[in-house]
Image (cartoon, rainbow, N blue to C red):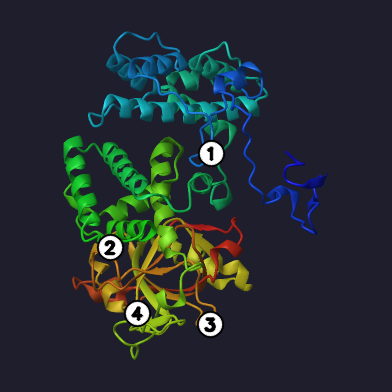
């Protein structure tokens, strides 16, 4: 093959030299020439395990763009028998019974939606995830996977090595047992984005998810979240169906990227809520709650949410967008509609130039002496004032729009006005203006992704106390004011910055 492509020598770890001229590339990137191995027949997973090339518990999948021998598709009965074998269950003749038993073994709630093949595929994914996490636990305690043992037997073995037999026995279902072991083996660092499950999952998903993937993730997030709230499945299904249909409405002919962007923005800004304990909870609030929690027990839940975050972030990122597509708060004298000048970013009308506004609720001790924002605002070094949010941060060009959210602040929380300032010259590479695609016109929303970086400029107390306000509705004079400076680029800031529990 080297002769066929005129490669005269191979210098390992440095360069590939082509004999037909001075042509150098780093070895890690290859020589740039496509090679087709006509005589190489890919090994199956079973053959690789048999020859000791991979460990039995290593999950594998075929890349979508990889050229390989066709993978035979098992019929449903054989497929469910393989699933039962992996779980150490005795397989029956009927696929439906095998699927029900697999759900019970994993400790997952059964769903009435989807075909048996779809349920089998979902269970296979869950087993792959459980297997992957268990293999990391075994590796951490120095135990070689034993191919002769079933998955439950491997779990029992890991529990013995970790000294957690009683805790694992008490856990309901194989998934919960492995999650418990994984949590003990790899404890998360509190208040540190570096070790969060979000970033681990975020790095596993593609940068621009497809529209079907985003729709599936939407259904998964809402279904799992609502199940935790005890909502009726049929009510949730109806809400999800209508939400997806509204977000797909008015999507004319457009390329795939714009189609996903349009869908995810309409989804995020949809203002029809799901009824929960007498109140209406909008989709954006549900997604925010899932992202904030980052809890091990909701691993599959968070994984689906990260797909939606990926889709939204791809729309928000300014790194590869034409300048004339970008919109910035231009102040009260800017045009109501942003100027569209080729090669230049536009400015739209806002209450203050290069400033957006957000109303939120916080506990008083986050703001007073020694609180999170108070400490950061008093730091001497600018770098010591930085932090990351734990959720999306939505703001508006117009302060009146932000103040409209005061009515949503619970009585036990302090009303806080966040004033977010953007550098006029360097701007911000990770924020997006949603007005063009939004489901709620007139909000002039400027949205930052989860774990965005800000610096605290200062904290000011309300100009009116609760006694003076009496029974009057909350107004601007009743708000704490926190000045924030948006970072120019999230990617250049340290991952280990403090995380704000409230923003």
Disc 2 secondary structure class: loop
Residue at the disc numbered 4: 463
Disc 1 secondary structure class: loop
State the separation of the CA atoms marked 4 and 1. Answer: 63 Å
User: In the rendered image of this protein, does residue 309 appear above or below residue 163?
Assistant: below
Pair 3/2: label in front: 3
Pair 4/1: label in front: 1
- Residue beneath the point at 31% across and 8% down: 93
- Residue beneath the point at 41% across and 50% down: 209
Picture quarter with the N terminus? top right
Residue at the disc numbered 3: 425
Disc 3 secondary structure class: loop
* Label 2 vs 4, first from the N-terminus: 2
Q: 277 left or right of 420? A: left
Image location (x, y in percent) of residue 210: 38, 49
Residue at the disc numbered 2: 409
300 and 325: which is toward the camera: 325
State the separation of the CA atoms marked 1 and 3. Answer: 44 Å
Local crowd size for mark 3, using a 10 Å CA cut-off: few (<14), some (14–19), many (≥20): few
Pair 3/4: label in front: 3
Image location (x, y in percent) of residue 485: 50, 74
Image location (x, y in percent) of residue 162: 60, 23
498 and 196: which is toward the camera: 196
* Label 3 vs 2, first from the N-terminus: 2
Image location (x, y in percent) of residue 313: 43, 59
């Amino acid at each position: 093959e080297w002769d066929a492509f005129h490669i005269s020598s191979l210098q390992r770890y440095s360069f590939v030299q082509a004999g037909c001229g001075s042509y150098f590339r780093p070895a890690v990137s290859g020589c740039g020439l496509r090679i087709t191995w006509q005589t190489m027949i890919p090994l199956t997973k079973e053959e690789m395990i048999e020859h000791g090339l991979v460990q039995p518990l290593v999950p594998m999948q075929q890349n979508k763009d990889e050229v390989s021998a066709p993978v035979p598709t098992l019929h449903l009965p054989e497929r469910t028998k393989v699933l039962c074998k992996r779980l150490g269950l005795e397989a029956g003749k009927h696929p439906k019974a095998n699927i029900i038993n697999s759900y019970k073994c994993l400790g997952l709630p059964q769903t009435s939606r989807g075909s048996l093949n779809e349920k089998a595929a979902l269970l296979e994914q869950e087993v792959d995830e459980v297997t992957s996490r268990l293999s990391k636990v075994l590796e951490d305690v120095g135990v070689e996977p034993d191919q002769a043992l079933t998955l439950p037997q491997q779990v029992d073995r890991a529990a013995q090595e970790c000294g957690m037999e009683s805790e694992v026995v008490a856990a309901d279902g194989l998934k919960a047992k492995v999650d418990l072991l994984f949590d003990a083996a790899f404890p998360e660092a509190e208040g540190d984005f570096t070790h969060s499950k979000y970033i681990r999952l975020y790095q596993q998903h593609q940068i621009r998810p497809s529209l079907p993937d985003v729709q599936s993730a939407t259904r998964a997030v809402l279904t799992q979240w609502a199940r935790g709230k005890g909502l009726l499945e049929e009510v949730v299904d109806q809400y999800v169906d209508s939400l997806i249909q509204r977000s797909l409405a008015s999507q004319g002919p457009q390329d795939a990227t714009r189609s996903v962007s349009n869908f995810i923005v309409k989804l995020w800004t949809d203002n029809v809520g799901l009824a929960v304990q007498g109140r209406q909870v909008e989709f954006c609030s549900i997604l925010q709650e899932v992202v904030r929690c980052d809890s091990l027990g909701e691993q599959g839940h968070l994984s689906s949410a990260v797909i939606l975050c990926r889709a939204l972030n791809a729309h928000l990122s300014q790194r590869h967008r034409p300048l004339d597509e970008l919109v910035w708060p231009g102040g009260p004298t800017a045009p109501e509609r942003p100027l569209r000048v080729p090669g230049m970013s536009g400015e739209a009308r806002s209450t203050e130039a290069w400033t957006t506004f957000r109303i939120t609720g916080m506990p008083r001790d986050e703001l007073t002496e020694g609180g999170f924002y108070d400490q950061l605002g008093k730091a001497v070094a600018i770098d010591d004032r930085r932090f990351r949010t734990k959720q999306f941060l939505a703001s508006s060009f117009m302060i009146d729009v932000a103040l409209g959210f005061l009515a949503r602040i619970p009585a036990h929380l302090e009303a806080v006005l966040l004033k977010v300032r953007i550098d006029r010259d360097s701007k911000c590479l990770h924020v997006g203006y949603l007005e063009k695609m939004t489901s709620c016109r007139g909000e002039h929303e400027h949205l930052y992704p989860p774990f965005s970086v800000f610096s605290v400029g200062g904290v000011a107390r309300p100009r009116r106390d609760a006694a003076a306000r009496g029974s009057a509705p909350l107004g601007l004079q009743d708000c704490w004011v926190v000045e924030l400076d948006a970072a120019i680029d999230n990617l250049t800031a340290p991952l280990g910055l403090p995380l704000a529990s409230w923003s």
